[in-house]
Each structure stands twice: as structure tokens, then as C-alpha cells.
Amino acid sequence: MEQPLPQSAQAVVIGGGIVGLSVLYHLTKMGWKDVVLLEKHELTSGTTWHSAALVSPMRGTRGQTTLARYSGNLYESLRDETGIETGMRRCGHLNIASSEARLEELRHNLTLMRSFELEAEMVDQAEVARRWPMMETDDVLGAIWTPSSGRADPSNICQAFARVAKAAGARIVEHTRLTGVHRQNGHVAGVETDRGKIEAGIVINCTGLWGRDIGAMAGERAPLFACEHFYLLTETMEGITPDLPVFRDGDAHLYVREEVGGLLVGCFEPNPRALPMEKLPHDSAYILLDEDWDHFSPMLEGAMHRIPALETTGVRMLLNGPESFTQDNSPLMGEAPGLRGFWYCCGMNSAGVVLGGGAGWATAEWIVNGAPPVDLASCDVKRFPAALDTAAALSERIPEVLAHHFTIRWPGREMETARGARRSALHDRLAARGAAFGARSGWEKPLYFDAAAEVDPKVLGFGRPVWQDAVERENAAVRDGVVLFDQSSFGKIRVQGGDAEKVLQRLCAADIAKPGCAHYTAMLNDQGGFVSDLTVTRLAEDDFLVITGTAQAAQDTAYIAHNISTTEHATVTEVTSGLGTLLITGPQSRAAIAAISSADLSNQAFPFAAVREIEVGYARVLAVRLSFAGELGWELHVPTEMMTGIWDTLATAVPGLVPAGANALNCARLEKGFRSWGHDIGPRETPLEAGLGFAVSWSKEPTFRGHEALLRQRDAGIDKRLLSMTLDTNAWPTGHHPVYRDGKLAGELASATCSALLGSSVALGWIERGGVSDDDLKSDRFEVEVGGKRYDADIHFEAPFDPRGKRMRG
């Protein structure tokens, strides 16, 4: 008998796979009873049913690792809660290396695992052979063994989720298709189905493969795309037991686990195929695609080399199922930028089972409490600008993402597809100077300059990069001469209207009311953690310019807009495309700008942090006396159409002007100890912990969001803090390496590079204080682990370079 469709609900979950059911389960656990899940076919009939269901806690970020670890623990506890066998078995995983390069990567991965406090160890060839007797190990050089990893049964997990949710009052409605999403005054108002309408103030898109289509129904975007994904199922094999570890052979693009007495042999091949949605049968459940033995055969050859018994083993099937992926291999989660109440939990990149339990937990917490339980900035759907959500870009990029699942993750590797989507007006001129570009939020951003074409950017490694000489030349020019950084990718946002000041004062920790200067500030969450850090300039009584990071423009625009009440008169407009940004910095920057401008640039007329409209060449620009490099310098915000004219005038008038890239700027800002959102600070860190308390206005009215949390922390004291660190130049850290204090794990590096100026590697790192004072920390011994080796490190309570900022203030 068909279940009646409710007319209203507190929340509607779209999609009956493991992710949607996890969201439903966790919402009911948090006390939400009036929740409906819609599934167009039957539960688990999407991609969940053909998942390989590997459960390994190690992911690329601490936040996602927490989600994965939570999933494994949850799948175990569901057995006792429901009596349903979830199939969660901690059989362990082996990640093997058959090349020196892969072995080096494993050493770096093991270091990251230690930073994330995961149980893991490096084992030798003999131990691999002992744990996997049927494996050919003559060419195996070593492996990482993670005993807490395992596999699970996704269908049974979904049954367990559904049983608990329904017992708590949630309704699961199958065979009901979503046909529309209703909007009202910028907020979701409900959904339309082929059986009628449901009014709801919360709608969660958990439709995986179909996430982009469902997002479009709401007038929102979900930049994901499908690819074909293959695995082989064998007949039963002697010696294969359920406790046999899963193993991954990245050099052969393979993963292998036990399946009903046989093997499941899966791959992330180097030449995957995009799968346009129009090629999928939209009205079908349990979708499978045609077998393609020609495509799979190179991986099968690798599998037969690794497991010789496969040559004489029968095959049950070659499964080819669709999977969805995102452009950076991280999920899409969080509230839509343009529609309040419309949420995402999809785009799991073939990791729906390992992330599903944790992703449902985090999404429910985010919806109910207003913040996720861990830092999920790497998953927030708002990290992608609209420019990156086109079928053409996704169909090129997504296969490359899948292909890199098992390639070595070299530092400095750049994606090659879907490039050139966003270019500064100076792109061609910078390219003519030898700019080597990287992609940042779709922008082509100069990383370094190689006018003599001496650098082969495809030569990658974990040590000194081939472009380091170029970076050091640029960094020397920052400290001794004058350089130009094209920072046009900076996000620019106008907040205007009679209540613009009121809105920004409520959201910003600093007092941003004073005109004529740039206010460095933070926007905070209720816990006092960073939503973003930015500068705010008052252009007029009812007009403010917000400058934020390249990756933060979409999220900051949405955050400000979402926090304007219906009774407040204020508008928010992203104007990034209309303004280019030039950072002219270095000891000679004042003379360089003076060569093409009659403005008074003296300290008296144009002090540090001042903002003036000045004439530069033929243009009128907004000049801001700030420099992220920590030197004398100005940001010039220029109408986009006038950028090339200013460049040409500068290049002619200042022959010594050196164009520089993001790598040199990163080095300069770390020498100066400048923090970067998304790298060093985020939603789980506060200004007090980050050493940015100077940017907090404690007494302003109205008080800012997060004020009460910061007051409590100020009174109680902080348990961790962000410090500059220097260590051996041979270390070559890149970030997220574990930091040891007197031999015990005490924190991790956030950002790091090598500084020729300091003669050391330089980093920012988080240190758990453990209740001791700063003076006590000074007497302790610190080490940083990089690639399995520990290096002595010095901590600095002030910036290693120019700690008083005298050079920046001219």
C-alpha cells in the first residue's frame, strides 16, 4: 500500500542512499521527529548498492579524517543499537609501494597519519607477504599498515539507519520523484513531487550522482560530474577469507578486498571516462553500464601480476557503475550560497560509505546548531565560484580528478584540464614575462616567473622544487627592490545601503566605522572561530569595500547576505571581476608609484593602512597602503579595463620592477608571520589563539558575533596557539606535519616553505600548550617530522623577520 505523502515537514531529505539515510538518522538523534526522506526508487538503489564499501579513516584533511573515523565507529555501534549486522570488519589495510617514489610518498603519508593521531606503521616486504600470502611481493619495497581500517556492508547500514529513524518518527517515502524546489524570499519553502507538495523550511540534497540536477531545480549549483567506475568480482578462491586485509597498489591503480570468498578488484585507472548525465537512464534503479574489457584489461594485467592466482580464477562479473566526483576530490556540504535552508551532502568522490556516517552527523549538527562539529571548510559548497560550474569544465576536470586518486600526490602538482577559465587582464603580459601559472579557484595565478625557460614544472618531488631558484630571486627583490604581484583574484565585495555599517559591525570583530583606512578584521562564528579574515574600507557613509581571499569570495558574499535581516536596508554585491588588484611592494615601491603618479605618498600624507583615491597614469585607482609581503607597499584596486594601461606605464617608467608570483608572496608572508585563512586559521581557531587579538574591538557597540565566546576564552586562557617556527633547510615541509614537544605530539604545522633570507625552512604551526606558560614553552625542545624524519625546530613568539613591522611602515 502506497504511503501517504505528508503535506509539511520540518526537513526533507532528498535521496535514499547511505548519505541521505545518515542525515535522516542523525537529525532524529538530535530530536527532529518531523523529517521526511524522499527516494525516487528504493533505498540504496543509487550508487550505494555497488559501493566497494572500504572504510579507512585517513583522508586529506583533519576534518574529513574525523568524519571517516566517526563512520567506522558508528557502523560498529549500529549493530548493538539495531541488531542488524552492518558488516563492519576491521580487517586492516595495506598500502603497498613497488617503486622508490611511491615508498617516499608513503613515508610522507605516514607522517600525516601521525599528525592526525591515526594508528599506522610502515612494514617491510616480509610482513606484507605474511599478511597477504597470495600476493606477489618480490617487487614490494614496503607498505603502510593501518589496522583500524576495514570494510562494511552499505545496504545493511542503510537498513539500520532507516530502522532507527522510523522508530523516532521520521517518514521514508519511496517511489516518489522530486520535480521542483519552492523558493520564497531567498529561503526554501518546500518541494514539489510527482505525488504532490511538501512544505518545509529545510531541504537537504543527498542525491549523489544527481546532485547537480537537484541543485538546478532549486536555482543553485552543485559542481560535480559522473565518471564510469570499474571493479571485477571473481569466483571463490582458496585461501581468501573475510579477515584478509584490503590492499591498495597505487602503482598499478588497484585496490583489492575479499568478497563472498572471492575478490573484488577495483581500479582508479589513469584514463577514466566522463559520463554525461544524458547517457544515464534517469528512470532506472540499480544502474549499471556496459562491461568494457578493453578498457579494464591494463588494470587486470596489473592485478594478475600482483595476485598470480587470478590467471586461473573464474569471473562473476565486471561491474561498471556510475560515480560522481568534484573538482578537488572533496564532498559538497553546507548551505547553498543563494538559498537559505537548502543544504548539500553529496559529491562523495567514491567515498560515500567511508564518509557517509560522519557526513550525516556533521550535516545534522550544522543544520541544528548552526555550525559543523569539525572544520569542513574544505567541503563547503561555497568554496566553488559559479564560474567553475559548467558542463564543459566539469567533463574535462572530473576524469583528471579520478585519474589522480592513485597517482603520487607530489607537492606543487597542478591540474591540467579546464584551465584558463578566469584570467586577469594582465594574463598575456605576465605570460610574456615567463609566468608559470597555477589554478586557484579557477583563476590563472602566476606562481613564479621563468623568463629563460629553465624550469620543467613536470619535475616534481618532496624535496627542493625545481622552481626554487626563481622564487628566491623574486623574494630577494621583495626585500631589496620593488616587485609587482597581480592579486586580481582577490575577492572584492561591496556592502551598501543605510544599514551597511550596522550589518558589518555585527559581523566583524574590529571596529570598521572609521573612513579613510583599511581595517583588518575577522568574521567569526558563535564559537569565536574564523569564518573569514579580510579587510574592510569605508568608501562612503553607506558604502563599504570588503577585500577577501581568492577562495573566500563566494562564501563571504553569501555569509554577509545571509546575515542581513529582512528589516535591514543593505545589499551585497561581489565585484571581483570589475576590479583588478596590483600589489606593488618592496623598499623602492614608493619611488616606483611616484614615477607614474603625482600623489603624495609620504608617511605623513599616506600612512600605513590609509586608503586614498589617487591618479596613476591615466587611471584613478583606490590605493591601500598594505602589503601581505610585510614590506612597504600599496595595493592598487584598478578598474579592470585600465589594468593593462597601468602595467605598460609602470613597466616603462620603472625598468627595475620585478613581476613575482604566489610562491614568493607565500614565503614573504611566512617570514613575517602573516596568517592565511584556510591554511593557518579556520572555523575551529579563534583570534586569541591565532595571535590576532589586536584585530578585536572588545568594547564597540553593537557587539560582534562570537563576542561572548571570545570573552569567555580571554578570561579562561587559551589552550593552543599559533607560532612561527624555523627548522633545517633540508626538511622541505609543506604543511600538516606533526610537531613534537619534548618527544610528545604537541601540534602540527599549518603552512611552511623554505626561506633563503632566513637560511631555514619557515612555518606557522599550532602548539597545544597543555596548561603551561609561554616561558615554559621557550625552554622546551621542539621537533617537526617530515617524511618520517624529525628535525629540530625553533619556535618564535614574534615574526622571524622584521617583528616590529618597521619596514612595512616605511
Image (spheres, rainbow, N blue to C red):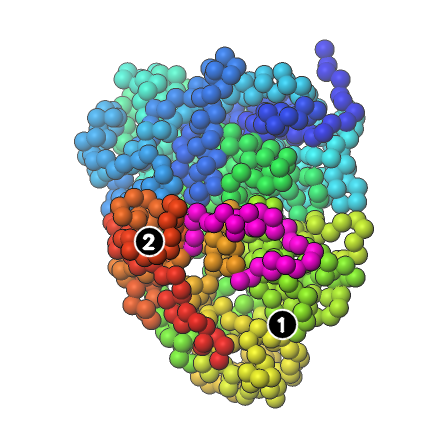
- Residue 77 falls within the magenta-colored stretch: no
Q: Mark 2 Cα within 10 Å, few/some/many (few <14, many 20+)?
A: few
Identify the residue at image location x=61%, y=48%: 708
Secondary structure of the residue carrying numbered label 1? loop
**Left or right, 103 with reference to 202:** left
Secondary structure of the residue carrying numbered label 2? helix
In this figure, what is the number of numbered marks? 2
Identify the residue at image location x=47%, y=55%: 690
Q: Position of residue 117 (x, y in %)?
A: 36, 38
Residue type indicated by callout 1: Cys
Span shown in magenta: 694-722
Give above or below for 161 relative to 590: above
Q: Position of residue 21 (x, y in %)?
A: 59, 25
Q: Position of residue 327 (x, y in %)?
A: 52, 47
Residue most toward the front? 715
Q: Quadrant of residue 463?
A: bottom left
Separation of marks 1 and 2 at Cα, in angstroms: 39 Å
Q: Nearer the viewer, mark 1 or mark 2?
A: 2
Q: Position of residue 610 (x, y in %)?
A: 60, 75
From this viewpoint, is residue 291 visible? no
- Residue 705 falls within the magenta-colored stretch: yes
Residue type indicated by callout 2: Asp
In the foreground, 699 or 565: 699
What residue did someone put label 2 on?
776
What residue did someone put label 1 on?
517
Identify the residue at image location x=49%, y=43%: 329
